[in-house]
Image (tube, rainbow, N blue to C red):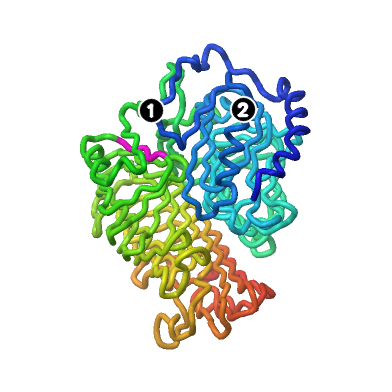
């Protein structure tokens, strides 16, 4: 990935954008708009760039290009950046590279308008299978050619956005895998193309084209038609319960605040139809603004104990003790893919069994000393119910290996009842540094012990035992994507019990009586011959346990997944020649 394609196209694109800007970009209401000159930015440190519409476009463009040139191709680089746009109109192009978060600071996306391209470039040619760790949030984009291209895979949220044109989720029909879109409006058509699987939650658009392996639409207006298994489409008309991700913004009194959205039940479409997502403000003065290299777990815990919220500015925080979030309604949020590296074998973060804790926008990285769990939501054996004010996690990403050697038993453990998880990628690295069966070890991606836990957009890959282990009652999952480990050295090393090959990618514990899940895909890419997985999904046969729309695939020439769910569904064939689909388990009438 390089800046050159942008340079070659920019002159034509910006000339077109300049001609169209007056028609495309609606002026801000002077009565409602903050006086931007008075909105002095807090000191977020050098990795956060704050842009004002009064700045010369060339100066803004140069800053964006410098970030992209430094980080655009650095899949495992140390750079972390957040690009913040104050409300107003901008005549720039915004390529979004690794570990870059682009944020509009308006009450709604329409308050920050980009008359130019916003784009994620694939990491290799047209292929976007490793186009990870980037984000676009809170912007209205007016592309001069009418098209925003966002070919990405995991950990690339597209949130609270408006596209004034079409949105394309591929480039040149190169593969992409694992998109997330939420709280987003597209004025035109969304073209999925070769995107293999994705989830859209609380979105709306004119139309959608394309469906390959597993496309899930929850609370989305004008979702595509088609019925499983003939079409790889799962529609849930209403989002049962969700809280949107907190976001930085400038309020009408020129203050920097964090907006914490309220819970929405049985919702569809975007949260900002009336101009501002319902919720509460927290003044930025009530946040501790953490800095990598300056803050430690001890300094952050001291601030949390005082009742302060925390913003992690971009960078890597090397932690030799656990960050402990203990107060109700605490908001802990990261900018620019702030990364918490667990060193010394201790968890990176834990939360108490209290109401309303929010954790968002963070990468949790395992260190060389094996850690029992990277993030613990609620202590083990949590007892309190939080139905009226649950904990919520948004855009939380976990990594074991890849950037360096990492070792963990569990990445994410959810003990607190009623927790909402809103987009998580939980990855044992299959490439990069420190990768190998005895190198980057990780038993489970996520273990859920709490009851009434709801997850939207769960991506869990390559762990060495159960990718997902669900012990709690009344769980709900909307969209699941999982690849089992590529690298078992032999079948004996990859067997959960005598006569059972491997560990199911999705395991609901035998004693669970209620569990529901929709739109589930499990895939194998075994690097050695002679390896098989007996079943992708393993669930108890109980009347309250129901799975809908399941698919499995064997990618490449080696091995198979022998059954989809328990002993039903049949086997995959190599090279995705047979991808078994199960519409419902148990089948209707059973």
Q: Nearer the viewer, mark 2 or mark 1?
A: 2
Q: Is residue 435 above or below residue 218?
A: below
When asked about the image quadrant of residue 45, the answer is top left
Q: Which residue is most to the top?
A: 31
Q: Which mark is residue 281?
A: 1
**Residues rendered magenta in the picture:** 309-313
Instruction: Report whether 464 appears left or right of 54.
Output: left
Camera-nearest residue between 357 and 520? 357
In percent of width and height, residue 141 lies at 64, 33
Please say whether residue 507 is visible from this viewpoint.
no
Please say whether residue 132 is visible from this viewpoint.
yes
Q: Residues within 10 Å of mark 2 (few under 14, many from 20)?
A: many
Q: Residues within 10 Å of mark 1 (few under 14, many from 20)?
A: some
Find out whether residue 311 is within the magenta segment: yes
Instruction: Report whether 546 appears left or right of 512.
Output: right
Kindly report the distance in space between the C-alpha atoms of the residues bearing marks 2 and 1. Answer: 23 Å
Instruction: Say which residue appears at 26% left-offset and 40% top-offset.
Output: 328
Instruction: Say which residue appears at 77% left-offset and 23% top-offset.
Output: 19
Q: Which mark is residue 113?
A: 2
In percent of width and height, residue 64 lies at 59, 35
Instruction: Report whether 295 appears left or right of 51.
Output: left
Q: Is residue 408 above or below residue 164?
A: below
């Amino acid at each position: 990935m390089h800046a050159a394609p942008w340079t070659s196209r920019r002159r034509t694109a910006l000339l077109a954008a300049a001609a169209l800007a007056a028609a495309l970009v609606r002026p801000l209401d002077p009565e409602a708009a903050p006086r931007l000159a008075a909105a002095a930015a807090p000191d977020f440190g050098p990795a956060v760039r704050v842009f004002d519409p009064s700045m010369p476009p060339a100066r803004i463009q140069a800053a964006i290009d410098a970030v992209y040139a430094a980080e655009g191709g650095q899949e495992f680089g140390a750079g972390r950046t957040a690009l913040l746009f104050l409300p107003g109109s901008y005549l720039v192009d915004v390529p979004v590279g690794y570990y870059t978060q682009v944020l509009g600071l308006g009450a709604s996306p329409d308050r920050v308008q980009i008359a130019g391209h916003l784009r994620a470039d694939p990491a290799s040619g047209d292929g976007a299978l490793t186009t990870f760790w980037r984000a676009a949030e809170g912007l209205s984009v007016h592309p001069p050619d009418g098209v925003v291209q966002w070919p990405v895979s995991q950990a690339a949220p597209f949130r609270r956005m408006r596209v004034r044109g079409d949105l394309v989720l591929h480039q040149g029909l190169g593969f992409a895998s694992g998109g997330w879109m939420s709280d987003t409006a597209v004025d035109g058509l969304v073209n999925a193309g070769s995107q293999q699987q994705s989830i859209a939650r609380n979105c709306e658009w004119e139309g959608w084209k394309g469906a390959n392996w597993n496309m899930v639409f929850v609370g989305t207006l004008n979702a595509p038609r088609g019925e499983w298994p003939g079409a790889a489409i799962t529609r849930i008309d209403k989002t049962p319960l969700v809280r949107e991700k907190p976001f930085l913004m400038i309020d009408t009194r020129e203050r920097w605040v964090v907006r914490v959205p309220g819970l929405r039940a049985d919702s569809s479409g975007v949260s900002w139809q009336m101009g501002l997502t319902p919720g509460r403000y927290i003044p930025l003065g009530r946040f501790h603004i953490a800095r990598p290299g300056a803050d430690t777990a001890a300094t952050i815990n001291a601030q949390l104990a005082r009742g302060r919220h925390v913003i992690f500015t971009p960078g890597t925080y090397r932690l030799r003790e656990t960050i402990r979030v203990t107060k109700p309604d605490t908001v802990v949020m990261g900018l620019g893919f702030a990364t918490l590296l667990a060193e010394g074998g201790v968890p990176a973060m834990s939360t108490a069994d209290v109401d309303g804790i929010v954790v968002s926008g963070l990468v949790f990285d395992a260190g060389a000393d094996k850690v029992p769990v990277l993030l613990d939501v609620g202590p083990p054996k949590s007892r309190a119910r939080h139905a009226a004010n649950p904990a919520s996690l948004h855009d939380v990403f976990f990594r074991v290996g890849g950037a360096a050697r990492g070792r963990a038993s569990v990445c994410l453990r959810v003990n607190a009842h009623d927790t909402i998880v809103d987009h998580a990628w939980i990855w044992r690295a299959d490439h990069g540094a420190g990768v190998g069966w005895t190198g980057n070890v990780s038993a489970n991606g996520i273990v859920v012990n709490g009851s009434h836990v709801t997850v939207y957009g769960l991506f869990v890959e390559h762990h060495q035992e159960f990718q997902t282990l669900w012990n709690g009652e009344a769980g709900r999952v909307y969209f699941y994507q999982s690849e089992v480990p590529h690298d078992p050295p032999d079948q004996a090393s990859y067997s959960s019990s005598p006569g059972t090959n491997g560990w199911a990618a999705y395991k609901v514990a035998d004693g669970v009586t209620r569990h529901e899940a929709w739109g589930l895909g499990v895939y194998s890419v075994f690097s050695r011959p002679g390896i098989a997985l007996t079943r992708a999904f393993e669930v108890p046969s109980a009347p309250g346990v129901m799975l809908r729309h399941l698919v499995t695939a064997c990618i490449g020439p080696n091995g198979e997944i022998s059954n989809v769910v328990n002993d039903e569904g049949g086997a995959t064939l190599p090279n995705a020649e047979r991808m078994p689909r199960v519409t419902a388990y148990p089948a209707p009438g059973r």
